[in-house]
Amino acid sequence: AREGARVAATVPDPSRAVSAVRNSLGEDLGGLVRVSVRRPSVVGRPAEVIVSYAKPLGVTLFRTLTIPLEARAVMRVEQ
């Protein structure tokens, strides 16, 4: 999330922040996470990136058990 927030703070395009998160996580995990970017256009306001992942624990009789994991990072918009 921190890498995405760094990009979101300096680049207006949210897809660049999403790409930064996925690249920092690598091929395996990068494709499994959900990335949310909130970036206002006003300099000095907070840009926020949230990365969510459902970590599988194992399989029970009827379904796979998962634990929701989330990381959040906030940085001020610079440009």
Image (cartoon, rainbow, N blue to C red):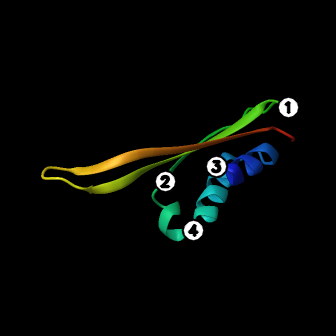
- Label 4 Cα neighbours within 10 Å, binned few <14 / some 14-19 / many ≥20: few
- Label 3 Cα neighbours within 10 Å, binned few <14 / some 14-19 / many ≥20: many
Name which of mark 2 and mark 1 comes first in the sequence. Answer: 2
Amino acid of disc 4: Gly
Answer whether labels 4 and 1 touch (C-beta < 8 Å): no
Name which of mark 2 and mark 4 comes first in the sequence. Answer: 4
Horizontal side of 45 relative to 34 (left or right) equals: right
Kindly state the secondary structure of the residue where label 4 is placed.
helix
Q: Nearer the viewer, residue 60 or 42?
A: 60
Q: Nearer the viewer, residue 42 or 34?
A: 34
Kindly state the secondary structure of the residue where label 3 is placed.
loop
Please determine whether, in this image, residue 59 is positioned above or below residue 13.
below
Residue 78, image x, y percentages:
87, 41
Q: Residue at x 85, y 31 (%)?
A: 44
Residue 75, image x, y percentages:
77, 40
Using the numbered discs, state the Cα–Cα distance from disc 2 to disc 1 in whole angstroms. Answer: 28 Å
The tag on residue 1 is: 3
| Residue 76 sits in quarter | top right
Amino acid of disc 1: Gly
